């Protein structure tokens, strides 16, 4: 019986391809992109609570990339301005819910005490989306989760998600609440993974 010879260059090519596929699959499982990471050990290890605040100073709303004030000024009706304010509230509530569901430690709004973990959710990209029966587009949000201790940035991640506008999710507040929960869960995944 003859032995078949496989060139080593072909073997190394297949090994390289397999490695690339594994890396791609591993990164596809992460719901966040690390901007800055402390440790090891992580500065977030041993946290007894996470204190959350929100920052809209870098937000770019819609495909026109408007600031929050520009967006509010461009709305023709008070109810449209109120919709935006309601979506802000919905996403923020969702973020805290998502963090709380996974972390197992208190998640509170406000300023962290000395030595405590402060999470500033800095919103960057924001699309309310619309559902109008015959046409629809999704709600979308992207943010940086910036973790600080005593004013020093220790970790930062980018998180983003979207929620389709459908017959079952016609209101942007519904979609943004779901988006907020996902963002909070992604932030909790990062904390849990880095503090193992």
Image: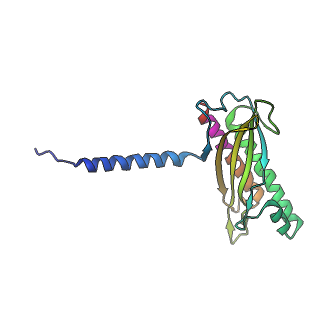
Of residues 18 and 122, the one nearer the viewer is: 122
Of residues 34 and 29, the one nearer the viewer is: 34
Extreme residue toward the left, this view:
1
The span shown in magenta is 184-192
**Residue in the image at 37% along x and 50% along y:** 17
Vertical placement of residue 119 versus 132, above or below: above
Of residues 143 and 58, the one nearer the viewer is: 58
Does 167 sit left or right of 77 as displayed?
Answer: left
Vertical placement of residue 99 versus 160, above or below: above
Figure quadrant of the C terminus: top right
**Residue in the image at 76% along x and 64% along y:** 66
Q: Answer whether residue 55 is magenta in the image.
A: no
Q: Answer whether residue 185 is magenta in the image.
A: yes
Q: Position of residue 65 (x, y in %)?
A: 72, 64
Extreme residue toward the right, this view:
78
Vertical placement of residue 76 versus 59, above or below: below
Of residues 37 and 92, the one nearer the viewer is: 37
What's the magenta bit mostly, secondary-structure-wise? Answer: helix
Q: What colour scheme does the image use?
A: rainbow
Q: Position of residue 11 (x, y in %)?
A: 28, 47
**Residue in the image at 86% along x and 60% along y:** 82
Q: Position of residue 106 (x, y in %)?
A: 76, 33
Does 28 sit left or right of 160 as displayed?
Answer: left
Figure quadrant of the N terminus: top left
Say how many tags the image has. Answer: 0
* Quadrant hosting residue 61: bottom right
Q: Position of residue 95 (x, y in %)?
A: 73, 45
Extreme residue toward the bottom, this view:
134
């Amino acid at each position: 019986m003859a032995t078949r010879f496989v060139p080593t260059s072909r073997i190394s090519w297949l090994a390289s391809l397999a490695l690339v596929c594994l890396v791609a699959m591993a990164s596809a499982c992460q719901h966040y992109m690390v901007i800055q990471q402390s440790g090891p050990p992580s500065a977030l290890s041993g946290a007894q609570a996470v204190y959350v605040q929100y920052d809209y100073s870098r937000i770019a709303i819609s495909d026109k990339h408007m600031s929050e004030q520009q967006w509010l000024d461009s709305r023709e009706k008070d109810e449209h301005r109120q919709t935006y304010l309601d979506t802000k509230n919905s996403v923020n509530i969702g973020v805290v819910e998502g963090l709380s569901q996974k972390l197992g430690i208190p998640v509170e709004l406000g300023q962290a005490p000395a030595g405590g973990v402060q999470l500033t959710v800095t919103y960057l990209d924001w699309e309310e989306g619309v559902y109008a029966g015959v046409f629809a587009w999704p709600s979308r949000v992207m943010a940086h989760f910036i973790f600080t201790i005593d004013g020093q940035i220790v970790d930062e991640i980018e998180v983003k998600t979207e929620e389709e506008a459908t017959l079952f999710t016609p209101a942007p507040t519904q979609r943004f609440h779901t988006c907020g929960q996902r963002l909070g869960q992604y932030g909790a995944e990062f904390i849990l993974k880095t503090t193992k």
